[in-house]
C-alpha cells in the first residue's frame, strides 16, 4: 500500500451521535478502515466502578450501525476501542450484541468478529502485585491487596499489539475493551507496514475526529491518511479546515508534556514533528518517531475504581450582595455548625463539599479572580458517606444553616437571602465511586492471555 486512509467520525462513540452528512461524504472517498474510540476517563470513575454504560443505547447503536454497514459494503475492517466508555467485559459484550443485531437486520454477508477483553481479574492482579510487576503511574501510593479489595473493576489499556494480533487472525470487525485512544486508530496502518511513529501520531491527532480541525465541530467525519513519511488530515465538513495550528494544538491536547506521549512499549516522540499545510483544508505532519522503552519493557496502564459511599446533593441560591462579599466566612461558619449539630465525633464518617457557582466552582483554588463580580451565587452542596442516612442528614443540615447565616451588614432575617430549586435532597442513580488504581503493569508478553482475552466468531449470513 502506498497510503492507508481511515474514516474517523467520532472521538467518543455513542456520546451523542455521528453527524451523517459528513460521514456519508467521507464514505464517497477511498477508505481502508473505519475506526473509532469509544472511551474516556473524563467521565469520572462512576461508570467503571458501577460497570454501567455511559451513553443511551440508541446512540451507541446508531454509531455502530452506520459504521458497520458501510465498512461491510467496502469490505474493509472496522475497529472500535474502549467499548461503551469503560471497556469492561460487560460493555464489550454489549457492543458485540449490537453488532450481531445490526448484521441480522441488514442481512449482512458473513464476517469475522474479534472481541478483545481487557478487564483484569482481581485475583490475577494480586499475583502480579506480589510478583513485583506493578508500579504507580499518577497514583502516589503502591498497589496493594488493600487497594485491590477497595476496587470493584479494573481494566488494562491495550496498545496496538492486541489489535494487530486480531487483524492477523483475519478479523473484519474488532470490538475491544479499554485501549489507548491512539492505538485504536494506529493499529491498522501499522498492521499494513506503515511507520509506527507516524501512525501513532495520526492516532493521537485524529482520536477526537473533527475536533482536530477549525472551527470546532463535534461528531463530524475526517479522513486521516498515513503515508510512508507523514500523515494528513482532511475534514469532510465543508466549513472545516485542518491547519498546522489545529493539528499541533490537538497533538498537545491532554498532555502535561506536549512533545511526549507514553504508550505500551515506549513513547511517541514529537520533538521533531513538522506541521505543514497541503491545501487550504488539508494539513500534514512528518518527523514523529516511536522510541522503544530503553529497557525493552512493555507496560500497560491499569484503571480501577471502587465505591466511596453514597452521594447526596442540595442546592441553594444566594442573591444578597453582602452575603456574596462574605461567602468564605459563611461557608466556614456553615461547616462548623454542621459539625456541631451532627457531632464532631462523626466528622470522619462523611465528606462535605461546597461548589460555589458564580465564584470558583470550576477552577477552585486555581481561579485567578479573587473577588467575584456575580450578582448571585449557586452553592451546590455535596455529601459523601458510606451511611446514606448520615449523608442525607448532613445535606439537609447544611441546607438549613444557609437559611440562618449571619454576616456583616446583614439587613434581613429568616432566610431572606437564600432561594431553593427544591427542598428535597437529591440522590444520584449510582453510588459515589472514586479512582483507586492508576498504575502500570509490566507484561513479559504483550498478548498475555491472562490480561487480554480473545474471542473470534463468524457473524451474519
Image (cartoon, helix red, strand yellow):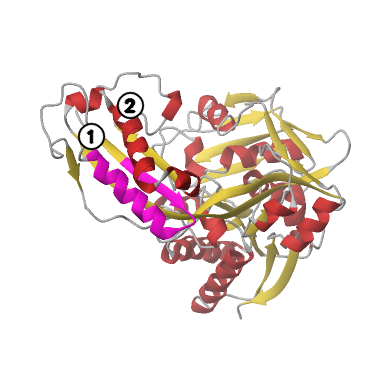
Q: Secondary structure at mark 2?
A: helix
**Left or right: 234 with respect to 188?**
left
Residue 238, quarter of the rendered image: top left
x then y, percent, for residue 412: 10, 31
Residue 167 vertical position relative to residue 141 in the rendered view, above or below: below
Residue receiving disc 1: 405
**Left or right: 451 with respect to 34?**
right
Residue at position x 61%, y 76% in the image: 109
x then y, percent, for residue 332: 35, 31
Q: Main secondary structure of the magenta part?
A: helix
Residue 374 at least partly seen? no
**Sequence-wise first label, 1 or 2:** 2
Residue 4 vertical position relative to residue 324 in the rendered view, above or below: below
Direction bottom: furthest residue:
461
Residue receiving disc 2: 328
**Left or right: 171 with respect to 388?**
right
Q: Which residues are magenta?
A: 380-402
x then y, percent, for residue 400: 25, 45
Amino acid at each position: 500500500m502506498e497510503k492507508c486512509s481511515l474514516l474517523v467520525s467520532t472521538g467518543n462513540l455513542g456520546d451523542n451521535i455521528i453527524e451523517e452528512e459528513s460521514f456519508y461524504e467521507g464514505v464517497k472517498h477511498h477508505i481502508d478502515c473505519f475506526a473509532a474510540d469509544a472511551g474516556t476517563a473524563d467521565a469520572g470513575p462512576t461508570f467503571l466502578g458501577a460497570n454501567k454504560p455511559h451513553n443511551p443505547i440508541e446512540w451507541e447503536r446508531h454509531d455502530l450501525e452506520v459504521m458497520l454497514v458501510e465498512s461491510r459494503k467496502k469490505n474493509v475492517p472496522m475497529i472500535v476501542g474502549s467499548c461503551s466508555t469503560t471497556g469492561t467485559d460487560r460493555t464489550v459484550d454489549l457492543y458485540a450484541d449490537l453488532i450481531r443485531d445490526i448484521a441480522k437486520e441488514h442481512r449482512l454477508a458473513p464476517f469475522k468478529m474479534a472481541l478483545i477483553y481487557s478487564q483484569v481479574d482481581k485475583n490475577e492482579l494480586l499475583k502480579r502485585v506480589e510478583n513485583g510487576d506493578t508500579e504507580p503511574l499518577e497514583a502516589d501510593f503502591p498497589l496493594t491487596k488493600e487497594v485491590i479489595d477497595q476496587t470493584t473493576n479494573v481494566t488494562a489499556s491495550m496498545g496496538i499489539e492486541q489489535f494487530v494480533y486480531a487483524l492477523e487472525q483475519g478479523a473484519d470487525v474488532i470490538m475491544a475493551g479499554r485501549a489507548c485512544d491512539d492505538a485504536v486508530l494506529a493499529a491498522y496502518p501499522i498492521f499494513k507496514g506503515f511507520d509506527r511513529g507516524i501512525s501513532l501520531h495520526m492516532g493521537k491527532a485524529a482520536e477526537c475526529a473533527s475536533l482536530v480541525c477549525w472551527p470546532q465541530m463535534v461528531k463530524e467525519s475526517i479522513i486521516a491518511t498515513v503515508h510512508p513519511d507523514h500523515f494528513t488530515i482532511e475534514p469532510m465538513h465543508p466549513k472545516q479546515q485542518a491547519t498546522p495550528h489545529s493539528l499541533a494544538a490537538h497533538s498537545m491536547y491532554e498532555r502535561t508534556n506536549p512533545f511526549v506521549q507514553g504508550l505500551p512499549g515506549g513513547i511517541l516522540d514529537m520533538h521533531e514533528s513538522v506541521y505543514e499545510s497541503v491545501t487550504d483544508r488539508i494539513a500534514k505532519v512528518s518527523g514523529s518517531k516511536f522510541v522503544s522503552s530503553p529497557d525493552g519493557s512493555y507496560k500497560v496502564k491499569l484503571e480501577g475504581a471502587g465505591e466511596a459511599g453514597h452521594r447526596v446533593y442540595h442546592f441553594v441560591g444566594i442573591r444578597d450582595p453582602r452575603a456574596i462579599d462574605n461567602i468564605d466566612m459563611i461557608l466556614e461558619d456553615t461547616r462548623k455548625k454542621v459539625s456541631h449539630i451532627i457531632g464532631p465525633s462523626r466528622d470522619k464518617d462523611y465528606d462535605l463539599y461546597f461548589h460555589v457557582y458564580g465564584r470558583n466552582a470550576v477552577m477552585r483554588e486555581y481561579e485567578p479572580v479573587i473577588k467575584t463580580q456575580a450578582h448571585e451565587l449557586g452553592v451546590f452542596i455535596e455529601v459523601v458517606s458510606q451511611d446514606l442516612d448520615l449523608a442525607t442528614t448532613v445535606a439537609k443540615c447544611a441546607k438549613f444553616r444557609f437559611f440562618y447565616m449571619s454576616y456583616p451588614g446583614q439587613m434581613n432575617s429568616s432566610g431572606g437571602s437564600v432561594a431553593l430549586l427544591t427542598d428535597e435532597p437529591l440522590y444520584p442513580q449510582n453510588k459515589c465511586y472514586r479512582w483507586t488504581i492508576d498504575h502500570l503493569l509490566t507484561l513479559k508478553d504483550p498478548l498475555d492471555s491472562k490480561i487480554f482475552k480473545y474471542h473470534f466468531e463468524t457473524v451474519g449470513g
